[in-house]
């Protein structure tokens, strides 16, 4: 672009020079040479008249032909021309260029074009090449109409070499001037090019940088001309664009941060359903979604959910502006989908917001189940107590033995009720997190001593062995003493309850590399079928309700364990197979 500017400048200079040069040449050729010829002819005709008068007056006194020769020579020398005189018959009378006496010889000269013309019109002229080879000559002839040679013709001839030389010189001068102007034009356009280019280069570089997105660049030109003004305008433009861009960028970052910070999945589609925008929460719901490539929309089909695809198509085909529905996505997630039509840049887009309601639904289910479970658990002992009390009313007086039996039934069920209420209250307390665990440094061995003491009657009744093997390095942990004891009691009690006579329940521990102590409670009991393993930590969940109830169990023990372990930053899990015993393991942090 810059080179072409420079070329154009040079070309325009050259065009002007060529036109001026051509005009000069044309003038020189047609104007100046014609003018010089006219002037020469006029001079020659004046001289011819003068010569004729001289000739007539001289020959009138002495009409001798040799005198004529001398006269012609004299006049010729005086005027610097060649003088020729011919008689009326066309015979050569005198010629200043010939030796005296030679004039008599020769043939008729009456057929010279200038002589014919002179006789006809009173003056005749012609330009011819000299027979003697000294270039073109201008001939001018006048008739002699007085004196003894009346009827003859006097002719003057003048060399045109001088005129030709003058024109040649002028042409040479013009050529030199033209060449000089040519060089000057190149030099000037080069100079102008350099000056202008420097200014342009600055602006060009800046525009190039701006085009590449670098709006921080400033030309800071010190030029005072129009280019300087242009550069300053460019600087202003760049800073304004930069400010606007910053503002837009901030706005975009803010929006992006909001979008990314949302737990809801957001998706924007165009009028044909292709995805224009999404956030990372959406990608979590639909992991099949690919990344955007060069900002091109993503086809709706990449959302691998026919329900979502249908919802979008429904929305696009109908004129509704809002829609709300529930969609199920894998794995086992329920999302509510709010769709809204939004107009942007004249196009009708859809904004879809996905909200994960799986947890809400799960909790609602658990609450329902919990209520049903509690009612059921309460009903059994209450019915038993009711029945025993009614019977007591009848037998109280008559049968002291039966009375004692029924009273003990009431007592047993009342204890069961109270244990149930106790467990429920405890679970409620833990779950509501009103009562926080207070971890401190405790010894697992000490806790186990207390557990063994508490469980001693059951252990003895069941005829099983409970012992603990805690190595020194795994003894000290950071836990709430009561919570740790409760965990150990629940696990050990289960081991005792679900084992047959003579089997062993072992509580052991080891320090793991991650700084946690892993405690395991292993029994040699009946084990747990695999299909129940994932659920035994749920509230009221029992593998065999009848068997558990027989032991006075409510199904709350393991859920209490899980809550307490997690509250202290640990984890609990189980390894078990039917017939091969169960091992419950949990982790507690070290101090
Ligand atoms: N060591 C074990 N061996 C076999 N089954 C077990 C063992 N521990 C727990 N279970 C099964 O898991 C179920 C849930 O145990 P959990 O301790 O929560 O309730 P529970 O013992 O029935 O009643 P409680 O609330 O009195 O402890 C039990 O009913 C039992 O079926
Ligand atoms: Mg239990």
Image (cartoon, rainbow, N blue to C red):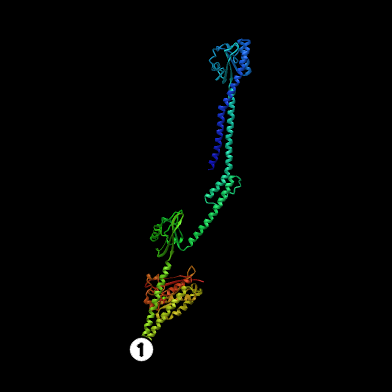
Q: Quadrant of ligand 2?
A: bottom left
The image quarter containing residue 456 is bottom left
Label 1 C-beta lies within 8 Å of the nearest ligand 1 atom: no
Observer-nearest residue: 447 or 217?
217
Observer-nearest residue: 586 or 295?
295
Q: Which residue bears the numbered disc 1? A: 399
Which residue appears at 44% of the width and 64% of the height? 355
Residue 136 in the image: x percent, y percent? 56, 21
Residue 499 seen by the camera: no
Residue 322 in the image: x percent, y percent? 42, 61
Q: Is residue 439 above or below residue 22?
A: below
The image quarter containing residue 139 is top right
Q: Is residue 363 above or below residue 319?
A: below
Q: Secondary structure at mark 1?
A: loop
Residue 532 seen by the camera: yes
Determine crowd level at label 1: few under 14, some 14-19, many 20+ residues with C-alpha closer than 10 A.
Answer: few
Q: Is residue 523 left or right of residue 173?
A: left
Q: Is residue 435 left or right of residue 37?
A: left
The image quarter containing residue 65 is top right
């Amino acid at each position: 672009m810059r080179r072409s500017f420079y070329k154009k400048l040079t070309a325009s200079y050259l065009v002007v020079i060529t036109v001026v040069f051509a005009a000069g040449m044309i003038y020189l050729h047609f104007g100046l040479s014609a003018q010089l010829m006219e002037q020469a002819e006029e001079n020659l005709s004046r001289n011819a008249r003068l010569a004729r008068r001289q000739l007539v007056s001289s020959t009138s006194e002495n009409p001798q032909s040799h005198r004529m020769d001398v006269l012609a020579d004299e006049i010729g020398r005086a005027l610097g021309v060649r003088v020729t005189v011919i008689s009326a018959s066309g015979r050569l009378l005198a010629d200043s260029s010939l030796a005296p006496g030679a004039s008599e010889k020769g043939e008729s000269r009456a057929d010279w074009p200038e002589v014919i013309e002179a006789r006809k019109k009173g003056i005749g002229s012609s330009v011819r090449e000299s027979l003697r080879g000294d270039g073109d000559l201008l001939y001018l002839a006048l008739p002699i109409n007085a004196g003894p040679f009346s009827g003859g013709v006097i002719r003057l001839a003048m060399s045109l070499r001088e005129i030709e030389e003058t024109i040649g010189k002028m042409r040479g001068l013009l050529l030199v001037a033209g060449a000089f102007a040519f060089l000057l034009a190149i030099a000037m356009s080069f100079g102008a090019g350099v000056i202008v280019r420097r200014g342009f280069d600055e602006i060009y570089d800046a525009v190039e940088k701006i085009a590449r997105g670098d709006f921080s660049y400033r030309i800071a030109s010190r030029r005072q001309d129009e280019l300087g003004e242009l550069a300053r305008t460019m600087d202003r433009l760049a800073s304004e664009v930069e400010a606007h861009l910053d503002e837009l960028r901030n706005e975009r970052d803010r929006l992006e941060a909001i979008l990314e910070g949302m737990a809801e999945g957001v998706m924007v589609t165009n009028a044909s359903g292709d995805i224009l925008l999404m956030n990372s929460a959406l990608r979590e719901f639909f992991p099949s979604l690919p990344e955007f490539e060069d900002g091109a929309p993503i086809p709706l089909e990449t959302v691998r959910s026919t329900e979502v695809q249908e919802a979008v198509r429904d929305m696009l085909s109908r004129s509704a502006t809002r829609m709300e529905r529930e969609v199920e996505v894998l794995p086992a997630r329920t999302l509510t989908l709010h769709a809204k039509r939004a107009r942007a840049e004249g196009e009708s887009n859809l904004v879809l917001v996905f909200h994960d309601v799986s947890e809400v639904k799960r909790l609602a289910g658990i609450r329902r189940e919990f209520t049903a479970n509690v009612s059921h658990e309460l009903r059994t002992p209450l019915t038993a107590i009711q029945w025993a009390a009614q019977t007591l009313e009848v037998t109280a007086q008559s049968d002291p033995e039966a009375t004692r039996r029924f009273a003990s039934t009431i007592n047993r069920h009342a204890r069961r009720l109270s244990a149930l209420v106790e467990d429920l209250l405890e679970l409620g307390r833990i779950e509501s997190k009103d009562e926080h665990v207070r971890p401190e440094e405790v010894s697992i061995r000490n806790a186990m001593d207390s557990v063994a003491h508490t469980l001693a009657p059951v252990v003895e009744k069941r005829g099983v062995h409970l012992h603990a093997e805690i190595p020194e390095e795994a003894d000290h942990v950071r836990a709430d003493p009561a919570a740790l004891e409760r965990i150990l009691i629940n696990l050990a009690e289960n081991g005792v309850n679900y084992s047959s006579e003579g089997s062993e329940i072992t509580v052991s521990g080891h320090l793991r590399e991650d700084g946690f102590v892993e405690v395991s409670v292993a029994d040699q009991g009946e084990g747990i079928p695999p299909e129940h393993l994932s659920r035994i930590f749920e509230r009221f969940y029992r593998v065999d309700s009848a068997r558990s109830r027989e032991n006075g169990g409510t199904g709350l023990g393991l859920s209490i364990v899980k809550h307490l372990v997690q509250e202290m930053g640990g984890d609990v899990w189980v390894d078990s197979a039917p017939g091969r015993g169960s091992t419950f393991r949990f982790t507690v942090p070290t101090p």
